[in-house]
Image (tube, rainbow, N blue to C red):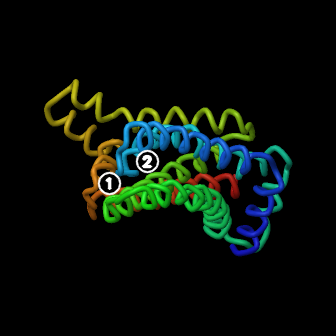
């Protein structure tokens, strides 16, 4: 697993994908930081994180799109599947590499709340809660992206498929509100947006944290099952 992880991290930072995604994220975060925290004057950086959270739907699948799809396209998937490395090690190694890139994005964004703290008071607990929610939500997005990457050898198809799935899960809250009743409650319960709202407003929720972690583990398990099925096909 460590070998897979190191190889994928090195591959990320040898390609323009990581730098493009990180650069775009920093510019985007800087833009909304300027609007929300400088022009408007809000001291709550969690509001800025909430604003840019929607863009993670598009960035996460771009980070993961090549992880398994490239193995198919280059023919190296067969070598991986016939190697002594287990499927869980392959999946977890690649996932952790994507999570590392995402973590770098988050760490670099710390500069913005630091600027707020220099200019005035910042609600530390709310900011930390916002970052925790942002991290676990992004981690779940990456798991979806890795799953769609396991379905195809085309990176673009993998990215677009991941974006579509995440958009559907994101807007389940609105759909549930329009439907109403028990079905509507279920839709709102599984919505990725509903779960993030707790963190966005500074309310740390163990239920939402558990939901995101469970969702991530389920997606990684399904990805592994799909990969295992192809291993013996």
Task: Locate residue 150, reporting x and y percent.
Answer: 65, 48
When the figure is inspected, residue 186 is found, relative to residue 75, above or below; the finding is above
Along the viewing direction, whichever of 170 and 78 lies nearer the viewer: 170
**Distance between mark 2 and mark 1 Cα atoms:** 10 Å
Residue positioned 74% across, 68% down in the render = 4
Along the viewing direction, whichever of 54 and 23 lies nearer the viewer: 23
Q: Residues within 10 Å of mark 2 (few under 14, many from 20)?
A: many
Q: What secondary structure is marked by label 1?
A: helix
In the figure, is residue 47 to the left or right of 72? left
Task: Locate residue 116, reporting x and y percent.
Answer: 44, 55
Residue positioned 81% across, 50% down in the render = 15
The quadrant of the image that shows the N terminus is bottom right
Numbered circle sitting on residue 199: 1
* Disc nearest the viewer among 2 and 1: 2
Q: Residue furthest front?
A: 119
Task: Locate residue 95, reporting x and y percent.
Answer: 61, 60
Q: Residues within 10 Å of mark 1 (few under 14, many from 20)?
A: many
Q: Residue furthest top?
A: 178
Q: Earlier in the sequence, mark 2 or mark 1?
A: 2
In the figure, is residue 223 to the left or right of 155? left
Task: Locate residue 27, reporting x and y percent.
Answer: 61, 42
Residue 54 visible? The answer is yes
Pointer 2 residue: 49
Numbered circle sitting on residue 184: none
Asked where in the image residue 177 lies, by quadrant, the reply is top left
Number of marks = 2
Q: Residue furthest left?
A: 181
Asked where in the image residue 121 lies, by quadrant, the reply is bottom left
Along the viewing direction, whichever of 32 and 107 lies nearer the viewer: 32
In the figure, is residue 222 to the left or right of 160? left
Q: What secondary structure is marked by label 2?
A: helix
């Amino acid at each position: 697993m460590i070998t897979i992880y190191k190889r994928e991290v090195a591959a990320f930072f040898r390609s323009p994908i990581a730098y493009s995604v990180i650069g775009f994220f920093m510019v985007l975060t800087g833009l909304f930081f300027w609007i929300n925290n400088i022009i408007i004057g809000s001291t709550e950086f969690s509001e800025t994180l909430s604003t840019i959270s929607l863009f993670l739907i598009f960035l996460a699948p771009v980070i993961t799109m090549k992880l398994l799809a490239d193995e198919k396209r280059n023919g190296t998937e067969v070598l991986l599947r016939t190697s002594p490395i287990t499927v869980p090690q392959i999946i977890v190694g690649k996932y952790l590499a994507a999570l590392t890139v995402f973590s770098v994005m988050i760490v670099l964004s710390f500069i913005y709340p630091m600027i707020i703290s220099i200019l005035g008071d910042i609600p530390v607990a709310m900011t930390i809660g916002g970052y925790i929610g942002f991290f676990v939500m992004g981690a779940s997005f990456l798991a979806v992206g890795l799953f769609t990457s396991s379905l195809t050898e085309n990176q673009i198809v993998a990215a677009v498929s991941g974006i579509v799935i995440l958009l559907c899960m994101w807007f389940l809250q609105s759909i549930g509100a329009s439907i109403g009743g028990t079905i509507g409650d279920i839709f709102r319960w599984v919505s990725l947006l509903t779960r993030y709202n707790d963190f966005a407003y500074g309310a740390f929720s163990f239920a939402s944290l558990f939901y995101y972690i469970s969702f991530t583990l389920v997606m990684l398990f399904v990805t592994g099952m799909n990969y295992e099925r192809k291993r013996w096909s």
